[in-house]
Every structure is written in C-alpha cells, then in structure tokens.
Amino acid sequence: MPSCDQKCPENCKNSNCSDFEGICYGCQDESKYGNYCNQTFENIDELKYCSKVKQDGKECIECKNNMYYGKICQKNCSLGCEKNDKNEITCFIDGRCENGCLYNYFGSLCEEKCDGCQEKGCDDQGYCKDFKCQEGKYGLKCDGNCTCGVK
C-alpha cells in the first residue's frame, strides 16, 4: 500500500502493490502494462501482434489469434502446421503447432520435411511410419540418396 490512507491503483492484480510507491505486483488486465498498470500497448508497433503483455511491456504472454509466436509475437507460425477448423495455421507462443504437423512435416515447430517416405509419411521424429522409402532413397528417415548403379 502506498500509505495508510491510500489504496493501490485499481489496475493492480488482487489490489497488491508496494507500500511506498504504489507500484503494482502484477496487472489485473494483461492488456495493460507499466508500474501502475495504466499503459496500453496497442499503439506500440513492435507489439502489434500481442494480445497480452508482461507488466514490463517488453514481452508478450499471448499472441493475437495464435497465428504468431516469439517474445514479441514477431514470427509467423510454421507453414508445416496443420490448419484448424477455420482453415487457419495456429501455434502456441513458443511456436509449437496447436493442431500438430501436416503430413510429411515434423520437428518441434513442424519446420522439417520428410520427402523420402512412402505412403504413411513420417512420425514426429522424422522416421518413416511404414519403414518404406521411395525409389532412390534409403535410411530410417529415407533421407539418403542411392547412388547404386551410377557410372
């Protein structure tokens, strides 16, 4: 509390703030930031894809429409992500795809592609599900090129 007769700013989470300065220990509304949780970030260009920010106003907690990721929601979700029912590619703030990877994509962000597998594609580690490679390919991930018979 700022002093015995003053209350914490109304935007402080759980009306919790420092005794003398009245600085909030968290913001009630995560679309606000600053010491007193009274600043908005909508007009800050580098935070234009954030829907919620940390109290310091320098990092996003959540990105708009979950179509971006990164510290300030500056990166697009991977094109290897499976689309949602609205036909949108969505991901979590750490870049992991919300709906998993598209066929023949793998990796933590669905950014790697496995082109050499037959029919069943690959698992989340890139190994062919049916253990069968396309002609001219070999290996557990069918990522090797056969050079047999080449003169």
Image (spheres, rainbow, N blue to C red):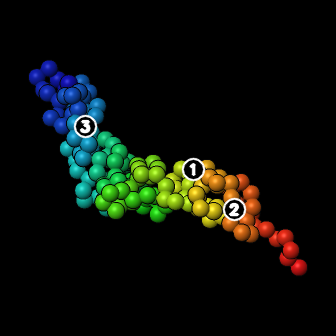
The C terminus lies in which quarter of the figure?
A: bottom right
- For the residue labelled by badge 3, is the local secondary structure a helix, a strand or a loop? loop
Q: Is residue 71 in sight in this rendering?
A: no
Q: Is residue 96 in sight in this rendering?
A: yes
The residue identified by callout 1 is: 124
- Indicate the amino acid at tag 1: Asp
Are discs 1 and 2 less than 8 Å apart at CB? Answer: no
The residue located at (30%, 60%) in the rendering is 86
- For the residue labelled by badge 2, is the local secondary structure a helix, a strand or a loop? loop
Residue 130 percent location from the top left of the image: 64, 54
**Mark number, residue 27:** 3
Residue 146 percent location from the top left of the image: 79, 68
The N terminus lies in which quarter of the figure?
A: top left
Instruction: Give the CA separation, mark 1 to mark 3.
Output: 38 Å
Name above or below for residue 110 compared with residue 30. Answer: below
The residue located at (24%, 56%) in the rendering is 42
The residue identified by callout 2 is: 133
